[in-house]
Image (spheres, helix red, strand yellow):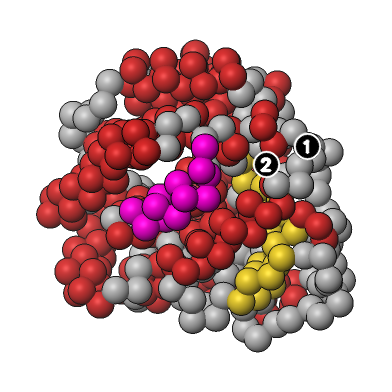
Amino acid sequence: MDRIRMFYSNIDTKPRVLITHFVRFLGFYLDGITNKDNIVTNDVESMIDIYIISDAYVEERTTSIDVEEEEKSILIYLDGWRAEDLKNAQFINYEDQADRVFLKQLSRCMLRILSRRLDRNKKLINSTDNLGKLLEEFIKQYIENEILQITLFGRCFRAHRDLYRIVQMQYRAFTSWLDQTAAIKYPGDLTKYMCVRSKYEVDLICKVNHFELYFDPMDLREECEELLRKYVDNETLHILQADISFELSGVWNKAGNEYADIRLDDCAYAYLKQGNILQNYVRDLNSAVLAYRVAAQEKEDYYLAWFQMGECYVKQNKYNQAIKAYEQVCSILSGRYNRHVLAPLEIEHLYDAVVKIATINEVKIKNYALARHYRELAKSILEEINRDDYFRLVWNDEKAYQEYFPRIKNKMKIEIEGKTGDEGRQTYSAKEEKGRANHIM
């Protein structure tokens, strides 16, 4: 298995989102661990362990900085933290680091750890000659084309048309470099995978924004299958194959089987996708809930799994269980909300969960006071759209801020405020009066 484990606090944004996106392009599946005891719920061996040590991380743990296997661990320090007694681990000080410098340091640490593995020649990451040079040039293109940023903001919502054009232009330049320059200078399977991954991202952004796909999904699938024949245990290749089937081609039954592959048996994302297929296509809500529960067990901060669980319970008229599921979304995202660092997708789901709790209390449970509390909370969450904290954390560029943030903010308002959940609403005071009168009678 080509797996990296990352131990972190979900309150921290950078470098967590940067690492998650970057290592996916290297063919690694990232297993995120956020529970306070650093307990790993599966017995699959990881190739590399990454610890993001910050104030939030240390506050949440019941133990001190506890590293299981130092020789394959990379410790990334924030907020002035150090652990002097760990002699065999790799260290990176993230404070005030430019993304390009940080990724170069991270890739060097990863290569040192991988060089000790006896099975390294069987792995996708080691399938290209002159790997160090490839990664150096890849990082340069990745940063210059702002691939992390345009991915985060290009496919969360239907983008503003001008932003969409920039996203397409930069991603296609990045893909062109992979397809032509990198493929010639650094031929090998890793370069092929990087190119397929990039083309998939381009097509996904096209689909989210309702534009014609730029690349043929059948060609992408064939290239992915060719790689899978060589690297049958690579989780990320299996996920990419299923995503191409589901997200691009819309072949949900085939994708359902691919997400259920035995090699993805402990993959939270695969269970989330299985749940979505069972809920929205098979219409088997009980099985969907089971899939979402496994996803939430495998990844403790997986608010998407809890949100979709709530959706299933609403469809089953199990309103108390729905509220509990939506409250889990609130609990997971509360720390990020209180620090004003919610990502656009997190704002959308937190707002939606809170509005649905309010609506259930209004329409079904008749608890109007609690409904009013959640309506007021929903208004506060909407204010997060106007905050720029998250944008500045992940896209620390003043020109990009001036040009794109107002457009992203306005688009988010249009998308999110349309989700009112107001069916059957009366004024709270009228409902409360009516409720008291009925109780007296």
Mark 1 residue crowding within 10 angstroms, few (<14) / some (14–19) / many (20+): few
Report the side of 385 relative to 191 (left or right): left
Of all residues, the one furthest to the bottom in this rendering is 80
Residue 168 seen: yes
Residue 387, placed above or below residue 40: below
Residue 371, placed above or below residue 213: below
Q: Nearer the viewer, mark 1 or mark 2?
A: 1
Q: How many marks?
A: 2
Location of the N terminus by quadrant is top right
Q: Are marks 1 and 2 in contact (CB under 8 Å)?
A: no
Q: How far across and how far down the image is residue 205, in percent?
A: 29, 40
Among numbered discs 1 and 2, the one appearing first in the sequence: 2
Q: Nearer the viewer, residue 260 or 237?
A: 237
Q: Which residue is mark 1?
A: 118
Residue 317 seen: no
Mark 2 residue crowding within 10 angstroms, few (<14) / some (14–19) / many (20+): many
Q: Quadrant of residue 394?
A: bottom left
Q: Which residues are magenta?
A: 129-141
Q: Amino acid at mark 2?
A: Arg
Q: Residue at x 67, y 41 (%)?
A: 3
Residue 59, placed above or below residue 416: below
Q: How far across and how far down the image is residue 377, in percent?
A: 47, 70
Q: Residue at x 49, y 81 (%)?
A: 96
Q: Quadrant of residue 181?
A: top left
Q: How far across and how far down the image is residue 77, in percent?
A: 65, 75
Q: Nearer the viewer, residue 170 or 184?
A: 184
Q: Amino acid at mark 1?
A: Leu
Residue 136 located within the stretch drawn in magenta: yes
Magenta: main secondary structure: helix
Report the side of 381 relative to 317 (left or right): left
Provide the secondary structure element on which disc 2 rests: strand
Label number found at residue 3: 2
